Structures are given as C-alpha cells and as structure tokens.
Image (cartoon, helix red, strand yellow):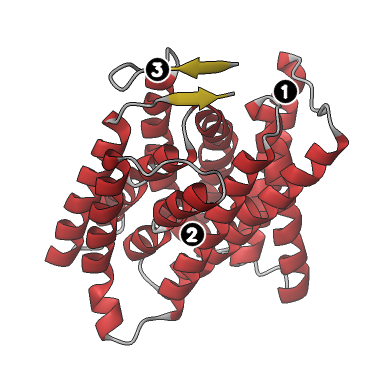
Amino acid sequence: MSFAAGPDRQPPDALPARLALLLIALLWGLNYIATNFGLRAFSPWTLRALSYLAGAAVLALLAQRLGTKLRVSRSLDYMHLIISGLFACGGFGALSALAIEYTSTGRTAICVYTMPIWVAVGARLVLKEPLTIARSISLILCGAGLLVLLWPLIQNGGSLGALAAVGSAVSWAIGIVYLKWAQVVVHPLTTAIYQLAAGGIVSLIGMMVTGLGVDVSTGFLPWLGLLYGILAGTALAYPLWFNVIDRLPASTAGLGTLLVPVFGVGASAFLLGEKPTWCDLSGLTAILLAATIALRAPTRSIQT
C-alpha cells in the first residue's frame, strides 16, 4: 500500500502514527527509570534477556489470540528480521543498560538519543531519503542541543557510560535503517516478536558469559522495573514502534524519538531526584523544538 501527499497534505494514517510516536516516547522515557530500578538487582545482560524474551513471549501469546501469522512470505526475510534485531534490540539494549550503570539515568537518555542523527544520515545514504528543510533544521537543533548537554562530559574527558550510550544509539540506528532497506512486509507484531527474540538471544549469551548477576535482597522496586520493562517498555512500545516506522520515513520517525530524553530527564528528576542543570534544560529545549518541527513537517510519501 502506498500514499502520496502534496507538500501541505498528510497521508491519512500519518497523524495516528505521529500520535503513536508521542506515546512511544513517553513509554521509553519512563523505561529509563524502570531500567534504573531493575539494575539494582539484575546485571545489564540479565535484565535485557528477561525483558526481551518475556516481552516476545507476551507478544507471541497476543498474536495467537489475534490470529496474527508469525510466518513471513520470503525465507530471506527471517534473516533480515534477525539481523535488524541484533542491532536494534540486542546491541542497543545491552549498551544502554551498561550506560545507566556508569552515568546518570537522565544523562544516559540524552546520550542515547543521538540516534536520530545516525538514522537521518543512514536514511540519506542508504535509503536515499531527502533531507528536507524541516529535517535539516531538526538535525541542526538536535546536534546543538546534544552538544550543550554533552559539553560537561567532554570537558571532563568523556566517560564509559556516555560512550556506551552513543554506541547503543549507533547500533539502534543500524538496525532501523537496515529494516527499512530490507522492506520486510509483515505485521508489526510479527516484526516485534522476531526482533525481540533476536535481542533476547544476544542478551542471553552475554548473561551466560558474565554470569546471572541477580540480587534478590534489594526489595520490590527492581521487580517492578522489570515488569514495566516487559509489559510497557517492550510488549506495548515495540509493536507500536514498528508500526510507526512502517508508516513514516525513517528520519522523521527517528527525529520524533527526540522526545524520549525529554520524558526521561523529567521523570528521573521527579522520581530519582536527579537535578537537571542549566545545560540540561537548554539542551532539552533545543531537542524539544527539533522534535516538534520533525513531527509537524509534511510527509510526502509513505510506503507500506
């Protein structure tokens, strides 16, 4: 199915996709708090393995109830889904959890969301998506905001946490651009299940190498964080996300996720007591403006 729209018209399913993107940003922003709680009892590999594999199992049960077929039409598409999942879920999940261990939750959320830059660049180079004026302005604002936010870390010589966070952003972007390039035609629920399963297997291997890493004496908050990660951050957010990237250009969807660190930093300040600095607030203002421009920009064509 394809939609074509003029410069001032939106495809009929563009608005719901953008609203879904706002919900995803909220779910994933709060998921950084849940991850912070979860890491108090679980190692990064164990937390991600449990979240991804349990999330995939929940979605598989849902697919069965809805009658959604998990088989794909082309055998090669299985490989595409797995490769994309290794980067978008496996690499992203492990590196972002590692980042939270070595730096603040809010700062991790900010560093991770350099991902729209990498998605936009990859979409331009690989998918030949045009860099429209709106997307270019969004990228400039995004880059400026992130530079302001990262400047204190740069002055201090950087950190392992920030490096892992940026690495997770690059890994995620590779997976998303690859999936768009492969043009796998399946239900978003099917895509989410295979991607989460691939990410879960990677995390399970990491857990087997590094050890289980579970501390059951830390109370109920880590389990609450794990439960949120499974149900909201994974089982609900990922099918929505794969539906969004099926409906919107990769660069537009990627820039829309700039709202995630806004929710993440706000929630970390409220729930974890992390106080944002003036650099944080200035950078987030630029990022919020960049996301607003990206979400309001016209979508010329969408292929599904």
Q: Secondary structure at mark 3?
A: loop
**Rendered-image quadrant of the N terminus:** top right
Query: Mark 3 or mark 1, which has the lower sequence index?
Result: 3
Residue 197 drawn at (x, y percent): 74, 46
Q: Is residue 159 left or right of residue 277?
A: right
Q: Which mark is residue 28?
A: none
Tell me how far mark 3 sits from mark 2, CA to CA: 31 Å
Residue in the picture at 16% in, 66% down: 279
Q: Secondary structure at mark 1?
A: helix
The amino acid sitting under disc 1 is Ala
The vertical placement of 216 against 75, above or below, is: below
The amino acid sitting under disc 3 is Ala
Q: Which residue is mark 1?
A: 63
Q: Which residue is mark 3?
A: 5
Q: Nearer the viewer, mark 3 or mark 2?
A: 3
Labels in figure, total? 3
